[in-house]
Amino acid sequence: MTAPPVDASEPVWDKTRRAREKRLQAAARFADGKVVAPGDVQALLTAIIRSGDRVCLEGDNQKQADFLAGQLAGLDPQTVHDLHIVQSGLVLAEHLDLFETGIAKKLDFSYSGPQGGALARALSAGRIELGAIHTYIELFSRYFIDLTPHVALTVARACDRDGNLYMGPNTEDSPVVIEATAFKQGIVIAQVDDIVDKVPRVDVPGDRVDFVVKSPKPFYLEPLFTRDPAQITETQILTAMLAIRGIYEPYGVTRLNHGIGFNTAAIELILPTYGEKLGLKGKIATHFALNPHPTLIPAIESGWVQQIHSFGSEVGMDGYTSARPDIYFTGRDGSMSSNRMFCQAAGLYATDMFIGSTLQIDLQGNSSTVTRDRIAGFGGAPNMGSDPHGRRHASEAWLKAGREAAGAGLPRGRKLVVQIVETFGEKMVPTFVEKLDSLELAEALKLKLPPVMIYGDDVTHIVTEEGVANLLLCRTPDEREQAIRGVAGYTEVGRGRDKAMVEALRARKIIQRPEDLGVSMLDASRNLLAARSVKDLMYWSGNLYDPPAKFRNW
Amino acid sequence: MTAPPVDASEPVWDKTRRAREKRLQAAARFADGKVVAPGDVQALLTAIIRSGDRVCLEGDNQKQADFLAGQLAGLDPQTVHDLHIVQSGLVLAEHLDLFETGIAKKLDFSYSGPQGGALARALSAGRIELGAIHTYIELFSRYFIDLTPHVALTVARACDRDGNLYMGPNTEDSPVVIEATAFKQGIVIAQVDDIVDKVPRVDVPGDRVDFVVKSPKPFYLEPLFTRDPAQITETQILTAMLAIRGIYEPYGVTRLNHGIGFNTAAIELILPTYGEKLGLKGKIATHFALNPHPTLIPAIESGWVQQIHSFGSEVGMDGYTSARPDIYFTGRDGSMSSNRMFCQAAGLYATDMFIGSTLQIDLQGNSSTVTRDRIAGFGGAPNMGSDPHGRRHASEAWLKAGREAAGAGLPRGRKLVVQIVETFGEKMVPTFVEKLDSLELAEALKLKLPPVMIYGDDVTHIVTEEGVANLLLCRTPDEREQAIRGVAGYTEVGRGRDKAMVEALRARKIIQRPEDLGVSMLDASRNLLAARSVKDLMYWSGNLYDPPAKFRNW
């Protein structure tokens, strides 16, 4: 297995393959075939990883290769240093520890969630060289072009001794990470909860996997998409009613992605009540690119939803999704299957609407979830909240939006990109601002561009408790600004409106107030919620949904 | 294995799973485990496929499930009819036969190539109900949302008796087609060239595959990306030089996709000569999302290219790609690996430039490859030739293009989308037109929107033998039109230019003539081509490239 001597006069075209062989040889003594004992992982990693390597330490929206993260963080920075970390989710403390000790130096990522504050501090202090912040599918795409990992540290529920991986509902990013790494002569190491004789199904073939290690405890999984119905306010219910009346119904939106906030959870929960009363069943919200949101259970059980493809899973939803194969994608083993790359592509190209909330919206409609002291990353919103110019298939919703936009040139369709917010967010901080905080942050951290979640020119509607603004119908930047001010309530931006112009916009249905849409604020009651608690969701599911402990108060 | 009786009072959530079981039961007697004899395929298909089913009959850009296509076309239309065909490439005669006999009724597809004429006639005659024409990744995306196949008829080089599939360099669409079908309780049937004890690598795990059949002959593969250097004209070489001097060099384009025409083949072939002289090695064209183009061999051998990820393979290139694992993605078995879904995503989100040619360009820069009597479909161009608004990572090329576009609002980056054409195409048909033929065709066929390959507002540059037009720098629609006219040569569109305005645009470097770029037409000689024939390409490759018979004249 020793590499043949290289003739210096001949170009060599398999340096990567030879490098891989050398690393595998160095690592072989720490493994029994592909199986590594937990105690040998640090020795194995030291044998395999070279300083300066691009390493993907998986790192998803939800599931975490937490054992491998800890092991990597425990290496000797004298030996392994200056790694370039390329991973979608930077969410564990260990992920940042790598940069503190110098094991890692450069970072390309998508989402930081709970580590947003610590990440901003580390960037500020110059402890991290930032490549870029990506939307998921963009980072995955770069794995094939210029950010291909040399080493991928991945995670699965189980494997066999040949390295075939079983991920059940938690496939998420793994297939794309592993494909990019394995087929470019990189090395793939997986932590698994169990090593079994035969996996229930093969999510990643064993010949792409070099080493496996049974983790001392099951991998960590974050319940990210669980919204407790008990916390949904009547203002959120009002915005949900306005969205249904003002957008879902007139455009006939059947294929869509919902954000993960309380406003869209409210929409999910009033489909079987308010939506039913409007006679919209089967006409809206039938096909989703969506994680298994517990708050969608009542709509599913009431027969609203026809099909859902998921980015990842959700804690407590495994039993429910397995029992609903007509709705969810499930494998031969009976459990759900997810795939973040495919689902993000579906969210971009095969849905007619993205609807989600945000922290800040400026006068051009640009939005951001960045605050002065936190870098939350982007996740999937920039991708799904953009109008894909490459789309060529028509749908009624898309054609109607395109007609309303009525740009110069050939007739076109248009994706609906909706921001649903309350005019004041938590702690009464205004959602509408003259200038996004991310602009200041970009200056402070010397970012190449300010981090913007969704650019204003892609936003088609803004929904607040004051009404629905249809930006497609605006014909000048001025009209657009006034349409935004016109639904910005008592924020400074809202109070700065030109009242006559806003009334003119209302006459043209560019702004629609609750009363214009036949929505009475008095009806916006919590009684409209098909489930008012997590317990209700569990009942709706026939006890198939098993809520995580932190959502149980009974 | 019989399904339990269903209580009519209880909703059923596994109808799809039960339907699958029933079909598998009906089919079981025609198979030995998963293996079906070629003579039993029609009986098996009849047992499995139900009238009205969505069927993906693979049908890629290159590889074809041709045996299964013939078998499907031979079914009794009395028994199996009104299928909804959802497949990317409609390129075999059998694909259209299905619609002639009534076996199939509705069609959603991406690319028709050689069947473009026959397809237009069938649509005209009302024999096909057209869903939509898609760009590839868009159709794949819909497989997860509203066009999920009930049955996938796929194709591989080999399989084992468990159904594990080996595809070698020709993975193409298969993984995404099979994942969408198998995980939504559909049925997957693969034709293979060989059934072996152990496949060289697993491209698709066997538990996603229900039946396999050894085809009487190897599957058909179309050499789509081979351009004979002998046919490259000096005008094409001139446009290639202009593109390098006017775009690759000033923007520093390293990550890109080349179209498949002769103009971009010319660029590939002058990198090691003209590009070398300009000192651009390592500064441009280092990372590609690209099929293994034979015309890129000299640039690869000269050390220009660092990495290529491919949509599919190319006939004759298997030996070469296997021997260049530092450049191409290759598997543990040593052969190349492709993936159209991932590579299209990479072409959208991880490259800074798409450059390709087209048949027609109008005054707004909209382009089309549709003619009055042919529907060629879109393939990948609409996707890669669009500016992804969801992109968030910066590169120098992207930032420079964004600065030049200088739209209102926040600073942004911009993808370079370049059309490289000669002012007159084959048979002296003008490339520049007042109105695209596709508009007429759309009316004749009652399409919802005219088929446009790339919309003008995404096009950043047009290169012709008359010069380079930079549309980013145009500030009004008028300027844009004159910039286009200004490089349209002696076509009617070109002669209709406002000469003073075109000169003013030239002064602002919106139009750059060959002499402005230091390109002498006298230098545009075939001597610049690093290879002047297919034989030359073979020599460059050290005889690793094995050209298909139709390109051999020696």
Image (tube, coloured by chain):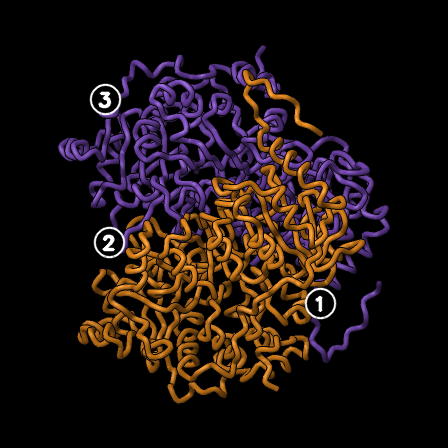
Chain colours: A orange, B purple
Instruction: Assign a secondary structure to mark 2.
Output: loop
Mark 3 → mark 1, Cα distance in angstroms: 69 Å
Q: Amino acid at mark 2?
A: Ala
The subunit letter for the residue under badge 1 reads: B
Pointer 3 residue: B515
Instruction: Assign a secondary structure to mark 1.
Output: loop
In the picture, the disc for residue B14 is 1
Q: Residue furthest left?
A: B500
Q: Is residue B446 above or below residue B257?
A: below
The subunit letter for the residue under badge 3 reads: B
Pointer 2 residue: B408
- Name the image quarter holding residue B417: top left
Of the two numbered discs 3 and 1 on the same chain, state the one appearing first in sequence: 1
Residue B188 lies left or right of residue B526; in this view the side is right
Residue at the spot 28% in from the left edge and 78% down from the top edge: A489
Residue B207 lies left or right of residue A128; in this view the side is right
Are labels 3 and 1 assigned to the same chain? yes
Q: Amino acid at mark 1?
A: Asp
Would you call the spot at circle 3 few (<14 residues within 10 Å), some (14-19), or many (20 or more)? few
**Of B392 and B58, the residue lying toward us:** B392
Marks 3, 1: nearer the viewer: 3
Marks 1, 2: nearer the viewer: 2
Residue at the spot 63% in from the left edge and 39% down from the top edge: B171
Instruction: Assign a secondary structure to mark 3.
Output: helix
Mark 1 → mark 2, Cα distance in angstroms: 52 Å
Q: Is residue B116 above or below residue B516?
A: below
Q: Residue furthest top?
A: B554
